[in-house]
Image: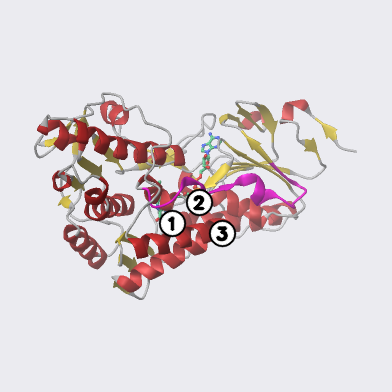
Amino acid sequence: MTMINECDLNIPKSGLPRLVIVGGGFGGVSLAKELRDQEIQVVLIDKHNYHTFQPLLYQVSTGGLEPDSIAYPLRKILQDSPNNYFRLAEVLEIKPNENSVETNIGEIGYDFLVLATGSKTNFFGNTNIEKNAMAMKTVPQSLNLRSLILENFEDALLTDDLNKREALMNFVIVGGGPTGVELAGALAEIKKGILPKDYPDLDTRIAQINLIQGSDRLLATMSEQASEKAEKFLKKLGVNVYKNMRVTDYDGYNVSTNVDDSFEAATLIWAAGVQGATIKGLNAKDLIVRGNRMKVDEFNKVIGFDNIFAIGDIAMMESENEPYGHPMVAQPAMQQGKHLGKNLLRLIHKKTLLPFKYIDKGSMATVGRNKAVVDMKKFKFQGVFAWFVWMFVHLFFLIGFRNRVVVFVNWVYNYVRFDREARLIIRPFKKKNKL
Ligand SMILES: Cc1cc2nc3c(=O)[nH]c(=O)nc-3n(C[C@H](O)[C@H](O)[C@H](O)COP(=O)(O)OP(=O)(O)OC[C@H]3O[C@@H](n4cnc5c(N)ncnc54)[C@H](O)[C@@H]3O)c2cc1C
């Protein structure tokens, strides 16, 4: 008979070693899947009850997809595995001396702990930007952005003040990585294909999409070929691309940069950086490194601890090829989750652990209809074929059959009809310092 320990979030003690995973993102989910029906009790904790497919958040923000189609219930992922439990909770503190974590719904003990908390937006300490800019890391944030974009057009229609109207229709995206590039392309397509039809009584030509990049090229982590082509695609769509420019301040209206202060925009979207989402409690020396990530060894073990591991964005595993750790993208998280699952079973069976080796499957970004760039180890290509590859890969990795079908149908519909029908203000967004 199992005993309920009320301190352990009502999870029965099973006689099996207990693994607590914090975070049901790409890393946490692949780890939990790997340990399905194994001799280990798995407790997955997340502050959301769903997994978010972050690569498609920008399509939610721009009305191309409904939010439900890129989220998937975490309980469903754990179904049919009797040793798996899910708790909807935020982990507040790790207590390594007591082998337990404190959450907002109580405390739970562990034999093994895996931190898979991902990353959060990095505003580099600029509190004004943090207060006034829009971030796009979660489904609720994407819905806020979608509402704000649409509310701005509604407000622009009502004002007689030309400066205000221009600012309402001026979009500044900070950060020319894949997120910034994809968002800029999507907004440019809305300007071209949807605004003139939706707002025939508004001069939509004054809408401006500005993409600001701190370095001298877009998609800086990809090949130069991909950067050049992405910039060309964006310019063709009418996006204003600024390179070697950094946004230094934003009060909700005036955008200051290191070059000049000429932007006035009601919407600034911050896609310029992320940092590890650390949790307090682990105080080993030199543990938190560049990008607020946690240093781990080649087995994903957090430096200084025997039974605590970290995977994905939060983990910094230095290697000869990757002196600053693996890129903060989905593949390392998924591969580390799977590998750690195997290693934990080896640990339980007292076998030696195997070091993690990252297989780089390439990177890609889409700019819009028929326009994408793909870098693979041996091939680099851009254009229509790259766009099909981008779509196929994203559909393949999306979790849930229903989600895949819904996204596919939406994409076909949007392609054929030149449309984005999820442009709905379901939950109005109250922007601070609204114009
Ligand atoms: C807009 C955007 C676009 C992107 N596009 C791409 C792309 O095209 N290709 C690509 O490969 N990568 C892309 N990425 C990056 C990719 O999404 C991340 O690298 C990946 O999600 C990392 O996986 P993870 O498991 O480490 O963390 P995540 O997937 O972020 O999961 C972390 C989980 O931890 C939970 N959590 C965090 N803190 C706590 C806490 N204290 N208590 C409880 N739960 C907690 C969160 O709710 C979340 O569910 C994109 C990211 C963003 C934001």
Q: Name the residue under label 1.
A: 319
Q: Mark 2 points at which residue?
A: 69
Q: Where is residue 60 in the image (x, y as percent from the top left)?
A: 40, 47
Hey, which quadrant is residue 103 in on the image? top right
- Dot 2 falls on a residue whose secondary structure is helix
Quick one: 9 or 378, which is closer to the camera? 9
Task: Write down the region rendered in magenta.
Answer: 63-85
Which numbered dot is residue 248?
Answer: none
Marks 3 and 2, the one that precedes in the sequence: 2
Front of the two marks 3 and 2: 2
Q: In which quarter of the image is the C terminus?
A: top left
Residue drawn where x is 21% and y is 50% of the image: 196
Marks 1 and 3, the one that precedes in the sequence: 1
Instruction: Check disc 1 and give the amino acid type.
Output: Ser
Q: Mark 3 points at which residue?
A: 355
Instruction: Check disc 2 and give the amino acid type.
Output: Ser
Is label 2 within 8 A of ligand 1 (CB to nearest ligand atom)?
no
Q: Where is residue 175 in the image (x, y as percent from the top left)?
A: 26, 46
* Tag 3–tag 2 contact (CB < 8 Å): no
| Residue located farthest toward the front when viewing the structure as drawn | 201
Q: Where is residue 200 in the image (x, y as percent from the top left)?
A: 20, 46
The CA span between labels 1 and 3 is: 11 Å
Say if 354 sits above or below 430 in the image.
below
The CA span between labels 1 and 2 is: 37 Å
261 magenta-colored: no
Q: Answer left or right for 122 relative to 235.
A: right
Instruction: Check disc 3 and give the amino acid type.
Output: Pro
- Within-10-Å neighbours for mark 2: few <14, some 14–19, many 20+: many
The CA span between labels 3 and 2 is: 36 Å
- Within-10-Å neighbours for mark 3: few <14, some 14–19, many 20+: few
Q: Position of residue 229 (x, y in %)?
A: 22, 65
Q: Can residue 264 be seen in this view?
A: no
